[in-house]
């Protein structure tokens, strides 16, 4: 904790980046008319920072009254800073980190708690919700940021009220709601690479007691990557999302909210940058008497790294357009009953379809082509009963049920160093994760007791039971050669090497399962189950010395359910699940508004005890080298400090500064193989977590000034700093990620009534070359780069 103490002493306590970001959408043009628009506080003195009401504890409260670490950002400010996706939250939320996997899976982490996995049907450690409706898998979160009132990011384990798996935190998007009067608005953007982004909404009454809101967004862009071998381009964006909300209020006691939403993504997948050659199976030159392989090794050995240019990459000729769809329908009912109680029911169904081809080896050579084909179906139901929010003793009880069905299959074209057995090469095969069925039931409750007018005790708990079944295998593809190669391997391991014929227990049909039993060495399908239960809980005390200040302390225990990784399983052990992970978090924090609302401060110090940390690691195999597989680190810990400061040095200028310092560490002996075949087995005790920078800092500022009677101007920008980290445990220096800072800027004019804003903007204006992840993909070490400099013009309007 010494480093934390030093940081606290050297840093002004920091604010949850939220209250500050609730600025009104008007520049400081002088007008006698109140500004129309984005927050009620906009008509008050611009010297004060507006405050946000949040629903972090499933009831409406002032942010300054909630005894949790929260970042809450208004939809207006998200649009102003160009935050259009969950991943973009790392620009505005201290401690939030987004990492893109080599195969396109988004990875979210908060305060170092994340789960790196390529599988479609694996629950993350950071749960995503829209109006408290869960989006269970990260690949389904692309449309969550459409037409928002605000976003609330809860930090630390949130398993009591927001469910299992929220060991890192929870992100709750609050959609902009239907209005009682006719309203409409939108945004039109044109930018570099012929980017055209259109978002609009219309809202108002459609029948007695019924209001509706329809929102739509489409984003198009030309390719931004270029091939270093043939100058072809990649990186086209083609994304469309829509949402229809219906609110029905048949009486003062009863309300219904219906939500139909969906999105379609036909964008290109991103190509990786080639860094170096690293054989998965060094020395694998073939069975005696065979034609040696790998046959492209000399070419890869002579290949130079990609240039230090964020646009440069390479890929095989072909089509890399995704064809992903997500559809969701949900309904919420609230009924007020005698005694000041409220009954709430939230029902949701969703379906995700994924077809995502990608060339991940960073070259124009046929090393590895990956085509993901998956779907998920989810049904969830929550019932809860809650007391009045103003009672001295407030409580909530409820129950959840969720059923997930997942099919996760992918096709691979593999011509690397481990793509053969003896004299037999194989080039194509399928990873068939088959069917997964996940059933989760839970009961939860929470209690707040206002012992005095200033002192409150909180407690909450949740019991969760989950049953998870999976069936799958490594499957042969017609003409790919895997059936012959693995049939031969089966007989070789049994001491009688030959090519098996039908009827032989080692025979594999052209589309048959090839995963080899560890005892018999015969091929076949694999079925596994994981049944777990846990009790998560939180206990805390909070003290309010005055109406604008809060000090709190919490102890929280959270769990993430065990998981299966859907990867090509040569042996059944690769499909073994990892058990549920457990975090016990200790946190002391507070927030305060000073100088009559001109300054907002917030900060927290925390310590996490981490058991059975789940991560995608490597498993060594005598024939095929280091293979990916889930592993579990027995004991680790996180120490950290997080802070934010928001203030107005003068009436028309505000500054928001926030950041997180983390000291993560593996505390127990844990032996694992590294990402390259030559690394051997390494004890990673004492190593820091991968993809977790020690220090991250956010800065956002804007100055507003009057122009004409109805117009004002503004100039602003933000900076995001990521400290140095690495991409995996037991990694050589090639897997290090250097520190980097990304700068964005904006300038423009806006009407005082909030009905029109014209903004010139630039992202990564210094064209900083950086990468967010490094991976070993079969025989190549590759990088995933950030976007180059982009710039454009946006027009925001309202009726």
Image (tube, rainbow, N blue to C red):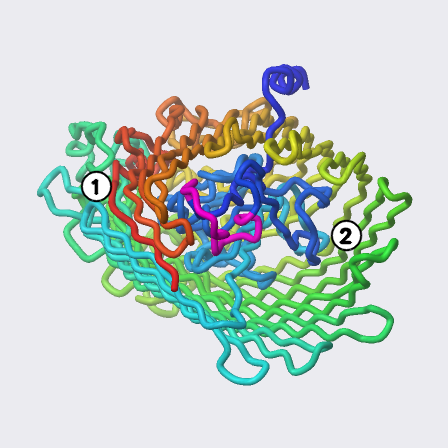
Confirm whether residue 52 shows in the render: yes
Seen from the viewer's position, the closer of residues 85 and 663 is 85
In the figure, residue 499 lies in which quadrant? bottom left
Q: Foreground mark, 1 or 2? A: 2
Residue 380 in the image: above or below residue 654:
below
**What x and y, as percent, mark residue 409?**
39, 62
* Secondary structure found at label 1: loop
In the image, residue 613 sits, relative to residue 247, either above or below, namely: above
Rendered residue at 28%/51% (across/down): 269
The answer to whether residue 507 of the structure is visible from this angle is: no
Magenta region: 27-43
The residue sitting at 55% across, 30% down in the picture is 647
In this picture, residue 273 sits left or right of residue 201: left
Q: Is residue 322 left or right of residue 467?
A: left
Residue identifier under label 2: 535
Q: Position of residue 634 (x, y in %)?
A: 65, 35
Q: Which mark is residue 673?
A: none
Q: Residues within 10 Å of mark 2 (few under 14, many from 20)?
A: some
Label 2, secondary structure: give it: strand
What percent of the width, then of the height, locates residue 53? 64, 51
**Residue found farthest to the right:** 451
> Between 20 and 652, which is closer to the camera in this rendering?
652
| C-alpha distance separating marks 1 and 2 | 59 Å
Residue 226 sits in quarter: top left
Magenta stretch holds residue 356: no
Residue, disc 1: 289
Q: Main secondary structure of the magenta part?
A: loop
């Amino acid at each position: 904790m010494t480093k934390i103490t030093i940081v606290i002493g050297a840093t002004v306590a920091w604010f949850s980046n939220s209250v500050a970001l609730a600025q009104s959408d008007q520049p400081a043009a002088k007008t006698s008319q109140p500004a129309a628009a984005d927050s009620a506080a906009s008509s008050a003195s611009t010297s004060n920072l507006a405050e946000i009401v949040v629903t972090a504890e499933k009831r409406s409260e002032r942010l300054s009254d909630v005894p949790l670490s929260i970042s809450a950002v208004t939809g207006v400010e998200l649009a102003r800073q160009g935050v259009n996706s969950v991943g973009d939250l790392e620009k505005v939320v201290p401690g939030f980190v987004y990492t893109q996997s080599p195969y396109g899976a988004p990875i979210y982490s908060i305060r170092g708690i994340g789960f790196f996995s390529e599988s479609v049907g694996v629950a993350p450690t950071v749960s995503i919700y829209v109006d408290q409706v869960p989006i269970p898998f990260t690949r389904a979160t692309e449309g969550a940021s459409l037409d928002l009132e605000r976003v609330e990011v809860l930090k630390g384990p949130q398993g009591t009220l927001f469910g299992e798996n929220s060991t890192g935190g929870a992100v709750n998007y609050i959609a902009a709601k239907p209005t009682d009067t006719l309203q409409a608005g939108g945004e039109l953007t044109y930018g570099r690479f012929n980017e055209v982004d259109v978002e609009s909404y219309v809202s108002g009454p459609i029948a007695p007691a019924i209001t509706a809101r329809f929102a739509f967004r489409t984003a198009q862009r030309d390719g931004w990557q270029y091939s270093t071998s043939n100058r072809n381009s990649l990186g086209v964006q083609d994304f469309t999302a829509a949402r229809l909300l219906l609110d029905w209020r048949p009486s003062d006691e009863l309300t219904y909210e219906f939500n139909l939403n969906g999105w379609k993504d036909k964008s290109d997948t991103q190509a990786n940058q080639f860094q170096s050659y690293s054989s998965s199976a060094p020395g694998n030159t073939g069975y005696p008497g065979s034609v040696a392989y790998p046959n492209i090794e000399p070419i890869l050995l002579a290949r130079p790294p990609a240039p230090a240019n964020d646009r440069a990459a390479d890929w095989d000729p072909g089509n890399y357009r995704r064809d992903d769809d997500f559809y969701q329908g949900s309904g919420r009912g609230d009924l007020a009953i005698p005694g000041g109680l409220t009954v709430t029911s939230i029902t949701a169904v969703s379906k995700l379809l994924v077809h995502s081809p990608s060339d991940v080896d960073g070259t124009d050579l046929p090393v590895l082509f990956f085509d993901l084909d998956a779907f998920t179906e989810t049904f969830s139901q929550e019932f809860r009963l809650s007391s009045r929010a103003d009672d001295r003793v407030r409580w909530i009880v409820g129950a959840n049920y969720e059923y997930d069905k997942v099919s996760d299959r992918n096709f691979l074209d593999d011509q690397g160093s481990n793509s053969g057995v003896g004299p037999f090469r194989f080039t194509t095969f399928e990873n068939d994760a088959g069917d997964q069925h996940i059933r989760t039931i839970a009961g939860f409750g929470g209690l707040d007791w206002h012992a005095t007018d200033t002192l409150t005790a909180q407690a909450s708990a949740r019991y969760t039971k989950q049953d998870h079944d999976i069936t799958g295998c490594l499957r042969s593809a017609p003409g790919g050669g895997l059936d012959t190669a693995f049939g031969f391997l089966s007989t070789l391991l049994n001491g009688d090497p030959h090519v098996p014929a039908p009827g032989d227990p080692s025979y594999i049909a052209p589309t048959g399962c090839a995963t080899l039993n560890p005892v018999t060495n015969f091929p076949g399908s694999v079925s596994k189950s994981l049944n777990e239960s846990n009790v998560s809980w939180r206990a805390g005390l909070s003290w309010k010395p005055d109406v604008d200040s809060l000090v709190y302390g919490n102890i929280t225990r959270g769990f993430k359910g065990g998981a299966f990784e859907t990867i090509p399983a040569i042996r059944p052990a690769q499909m073994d699940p990892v058990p549920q992970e457990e975090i016990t978090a200790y946190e002391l924090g507070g927030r305060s508004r000073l100088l009559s609302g001109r300054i907002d401060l917030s900060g927290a110090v925390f310590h996490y005890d981490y058991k059975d940390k789940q991560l995608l690691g490597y498993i060594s195999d005598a024939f095929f080298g280091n293979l990916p597989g889930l592993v579990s680190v027995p004991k680790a810990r996180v120490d950290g400090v997080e802070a934010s400061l928001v203030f107005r040095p003068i009436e028309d200028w505000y500054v928001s500064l926030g950041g997180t310092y983390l000291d993560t560490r593996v505390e127990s002996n844990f032996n694992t193989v590294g990402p390259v075949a030559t690394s051997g087995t390494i004890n990673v005790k004492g190593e820091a977590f991968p993809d977790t920078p020690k220090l991250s800092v956010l800065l956002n500022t804007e100055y507003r000034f009057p122009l004409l009677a109805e117009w004002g101007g503004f100039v602003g920008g933000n900076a995001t700093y990521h400290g140095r980290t690495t991409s995996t445990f037991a990694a050589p220096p090639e897997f290090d990620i250097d520190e980097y800072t990304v700068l964005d800027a904006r300038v423009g004019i806006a009407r005082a009534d909030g009905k029109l804003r014209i903004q010139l903007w630039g992202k990564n204006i210094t064209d900083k070359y950086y990468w967010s992840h490094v991976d070993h993909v079969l025989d190549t070490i590759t990088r995933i780069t950030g976007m180059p400099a982009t710039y454009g013009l946006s027009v925001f309007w309202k009726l």
